Image (tube, helix red, strand yellow):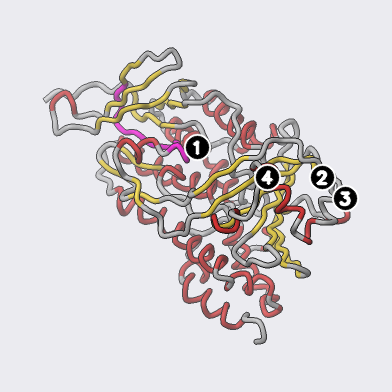
């Protein structure tokens, strides 16, 4: 039986980091790749503090030179670690002193220009992108005949619709979650519903009081499950946000910007640090962002990054998971397009989920306070253990040579017991 000819080997939904990395990897293998992107870049997105593991994936996709070249003009801030503050306690991790092999530095980025750099680079590499086009329907492959290819229906900005076929579709739509919505794949997350309020500020921080080469995570002085991020950029501005459950915000009044500013001014650790800050940008809010799906793959498609599962922003793992999913999916799809038999469960979903589950253990321990105790405990001065924890904070959650990856739950539980206050 003659099979229908595909318009493309792969269609990718979304030109964000996972979509661009997957496209670059597939194009390098000689495949015909097309991206459907509903927005025009640059556009705002959260996920501004990259982890060093991201640099490995960017290198794999031959995009690292483009990112380095754009860093100064786009105000990407060099980053080598993370600092943590809890009332009068301070500690930090230098990712260059991690246990795992690989990059120990990265950038904190304005996602608008960062994503645009990646998209422009992937276009330069030969991938076509339809800007301002929205995928509105997905038809999985039928059994044989002329309908044995996945087909998508797309609407352009003029309201016109058209169809394309591909041998496979990758959903890299992030929080847009295109295929999960169209195919009813969304499932309730087992993570509590939380809300983030955030904005960009002219920070005017004194250089001697703040290390701009690190993200700062601050724990609320009275609520251990409420925390703030402070992500500096290279142009004297910062991203700042607060994450809490909905009950925490119930007592606040005013618009989102007023609420956020009042919460920040009520946190004693910011009183001096942000004394000269100017809140000159609109604030934004995201609620109930934790998500999961019934399956990360199906007939003719796979889900990448946030389109599949998103845990929590606390360790800035979102872009790292997205890029890891792109790397795994591109390798699996390449083999499939070459005619090899692949198993998306064992070749893609299982290895991706292994790292997500490692992050999950540490995120859960963060909110119940155990990992906070570990971070600030004097016992944690052990350089080898700090290096292993630093690796996970740097994004190397798939390194099975690291005991805190290979056996994360048991190892962290044991360490948390040793680090309990009073021990």
Identify the secondary structure beneath mark 3: loop
Q: Which of 303 and 98 lies nearest the eye of the viewer?
A: 303
Q: Residues within 10 Å of mark 4 (few under 14, many from 20)?
A: many
Q: Which of 405 and 268 lies nearest the eye of the viewer?
A: 268
Q: Mark 4 = which residue?
A: 107
- The answer to whether residue 258 is above or below residue 411 is above
Q: Mark 2 = which residue?
A: 277
Numbered range of the magenta stretch: 164-176
Identify the secondary structure beneath mark 1: helix
Which numbered circle lies on residue 206? 3
Q: Mark 1 = which residue?
A: 21
Q: Do the CB atoms of the residues marked 4 and 2 lie less than 8 Å apart?
A: no
Q: Quadrant of the N terminus?
A: top left
Percent position of residue 177, x then y = 41, 39
Q: Residues within 10 Å of mark 2 (few under 14, many from 20)?
A: some
Q: CA distance from mark 4 to mark 3?
A: 21 Å
| Residue 207 horizontal side relative to residue 74, left or right | right
Residue at the image position 30 percent from the left and 48 percent from the top: 344
């Amino acid at each position: 039986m003659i099979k229908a000819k595909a318009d493309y080997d792969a269609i990718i939904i979304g030109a964000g980091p996972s979509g661009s990395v997957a496209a670059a990897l597939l194009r390098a293998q000689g495949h015909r790749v097309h991206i459907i992107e509903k927005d025009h870049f640059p556009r705002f997105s959260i996920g501004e503090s990259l982890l060093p593991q991201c640099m490995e994936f960017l290198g794999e996709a031959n995009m690292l030179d483009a990112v380095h070249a754009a860093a100064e003009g786009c105000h990407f801030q060099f980053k080598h670690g993370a600092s943590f503050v809890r009332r009068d306690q301070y500690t930090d991790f230098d990712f260059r002193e991690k246990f795992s092999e690989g990059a120990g530095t990265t950038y904190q980025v304005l996602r608008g220009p960062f994503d645009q750099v990646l998209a422009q680079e992937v276009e330069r590499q030969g991938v076509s992108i339809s800007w301002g086009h929205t995928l509105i329907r997905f038809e999985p492959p039928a059994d044989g005949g002329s309908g044995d290819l996945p087909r998508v229906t797309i609407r352009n900005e003029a309201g016109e619709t058209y169809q394309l076929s591909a041998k496979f579709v990758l959903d890299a739509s992030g929080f847009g979650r295109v295929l999960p919505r169209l195919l009813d794949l969304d499932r309730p997350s087992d993570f509590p519903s939380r809300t983030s309020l955030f904005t960009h500020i002219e920070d005017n921080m004194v250089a001697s009081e703040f290390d701009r080469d690190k993200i700062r995570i601050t724990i609320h002085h009275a609520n251990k499950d409420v925390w703030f991020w402070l992500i500096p950029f290279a142009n004297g501005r910062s991203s700042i946000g607060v994450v809490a459950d909905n009950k925490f915000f119930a007592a606040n009044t005013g618009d989102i910007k007023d609420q956020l500013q009042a919460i920040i001014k009520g946190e004693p650790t910011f009183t001096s640090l942000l004394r000269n800050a100017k809140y000159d940008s609109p604030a934004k809010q995201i609620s109930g962002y934790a998500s999961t799906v019934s399956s990360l793959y199906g007939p003719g498609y796979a889900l990448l990054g946030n389109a599949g599962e998103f845990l929590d922003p606390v360790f800035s793992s979102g872009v790292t998971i997205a890029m890891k999913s792109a790397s795994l999916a591109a390798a699996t799809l390449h083999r499939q397009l070459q005619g090899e038999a692949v198993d998306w469960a064992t070749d893609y979903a299982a290895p991706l989920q292994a790292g997500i589950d490692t992050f999950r253990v540490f995120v859960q321990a963060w909110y119940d306070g155990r990992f906070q105790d570990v971070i600030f405990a004097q016992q944690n001065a052990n350089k080898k253990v700090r290096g292993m924890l630093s690796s996970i904070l740097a994004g190397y959650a798939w390194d099975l040579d690291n005991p805190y990856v290979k056996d994360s739950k048991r190892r962290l539980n044991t360490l948390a017991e040793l680090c309990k206050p009073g021990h």
